[in-house]
Image: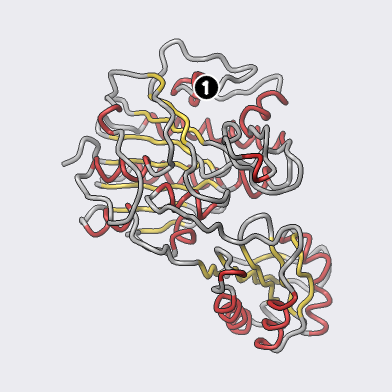
Amino acid sequence: MGKYKRIFTIVVDSLGVGALPDAADYGDAGADTLGHISQYRDQFVIPNLQKIGIANLHPLKQVEAAERPLGYYAYLYEASTGKDTMTGHWEMMGLHITKPFKTFTETGFPKELIDELSERTGHVIIGNKSASGTEILDELAEEEIATGHMIVYTSADSVLQICGNEETFGLDELYRCCEIARELTMKDEWKVGRVIARPYVGKKKGSFKRTSNRHDYALRPYGKTALNALKDAGYEVISVGKIFDIFDGEGLTESNKSKSSVHGMEQTIEIANRDFNGLCYVNLVDFDALWGHRRNVEGYAQEIEKFDVKLGGLMELMNDDDLIIITADHGNDPVHTGTDHTRERVPFLAYSPSMKGYGRLDNMDTFAVVGATIADNFGVAMPEGTIGYSILGKLN
């Protein structure tokens, strides 16, 4: 049996901690998601993150460094090219991404793609821009219902999203169109991480509601990851949030969809009350989707405080042979220009009740130390072709 029986890896989606050295190449010089949120606030109540060492790692205006932190902490630098969710998570579990997934935030999708999608599906396409899911429905859903046209839009992520009214467009038709879109967007020049079916109900502006029949058509990881290695070795690999979509279900033994980041932490706490041997891998998306992309500093700060409360509840349930790793997949600085992710280093915070030591670890040159450390703990070899190295021996 490994050093730790259960490892809880929590990805606070987009909680970057300062620009990477190449950030200027991405238009992100000076980005600092957590630092700028701290500067915006007079008060920032995050006692549990503080205890583990967040302010020791990344100085915050109103949060003092812990005199004796409970855990270890470091900066992780991204080795892959890009700054999107899939790149960050795939690297975390051992894959080195050298071709970034395509985003079409500023321009919408190319005419050639739209024309081919329209011809193959038989629908006139409307929208074709970056928008929030609720705004695009208020703007165009009445037209879609009246004409049979098809709403296509994107976001700051590498996604192509298609809306369909469940009563007039139909779920089967929506899924058919999304399957065609997935096929088309396998081309390198159009390759997006996910095609998402966005069904909704309602008939008039102000009454539209998206339903739970959403379906993601994700790219499958191009190689085996730490998740596959753990599953193949007989360990449990339990996901919470959109981990299933990010990895297209690869390497998972159980998947739990979350309604919100708070709900995701509640699910994680429920899982912590179980007896299992393996990994619980959590993505908390609201930081990114609700606040970072919408450049809402106050909302982001409040979400971190809500997370901190739930983190305290999780820490209380930890056994001596449990480990919590808190990290992120990219940045999304809510004071930065535009609405896109930001190219940032991310935090690595590690806590176990059994730790005797604590303190700062050296900066690490890849997110993949996370997956490699988890695999090492369970005595599982990382798959061939992966990157990363274990720091398990430093977590004493």
The quadrant in which the C terminus is found is: top left
On screen, residue 292 above or below 96: above
On screen, residue 383 above or below 54: below
Q: What count of labels does the image hold?
A: 1
> At numbered mark 1, what does the secondary structure look like: helix, strand or loop?
helix
Crowding near the residue tagged with mark 1, few <14, some 14–19, many ≥20 C-alpha atoms within 10 Å: some
Of residues 260 and 77, the one nearer the viewer is 77
Q: Quadrant of residue 314?
A: top left
Q: Quadrant of residue 156?
A: bottom right
On screen, residue 251 above or below 144: above
Return the x and y of residue 352 as percentages of the image width and height: 32, 28
Horizontally, residue 120 falls left or right of residue 179, namely right
Horizontally, residue 214 falls left or right of residue 282, namely right
Return the x and y of residue 266 as percentages of the image width and height: 47, 43
The quadrant in which the N terminus is found is: top left
State the residue at coordinates (74%, 65%): 108
Of residues 387 and 197, the one nearer the viewer is 387
Q: Residue furthest left?
A: 1
Return the x and y of residue 230 as percentages of the image width and height: 27, 53
Q: Amino acid at mark 1?
A: Pro
Please name the residue that numbered disc 1 is placed on. 47
State the residue at coordinates (62%, 39%): 23
Of residues 298 and 157, the one nearer the viewer is 157
Of residues 370 and 276, the one nearer the viewer is 370
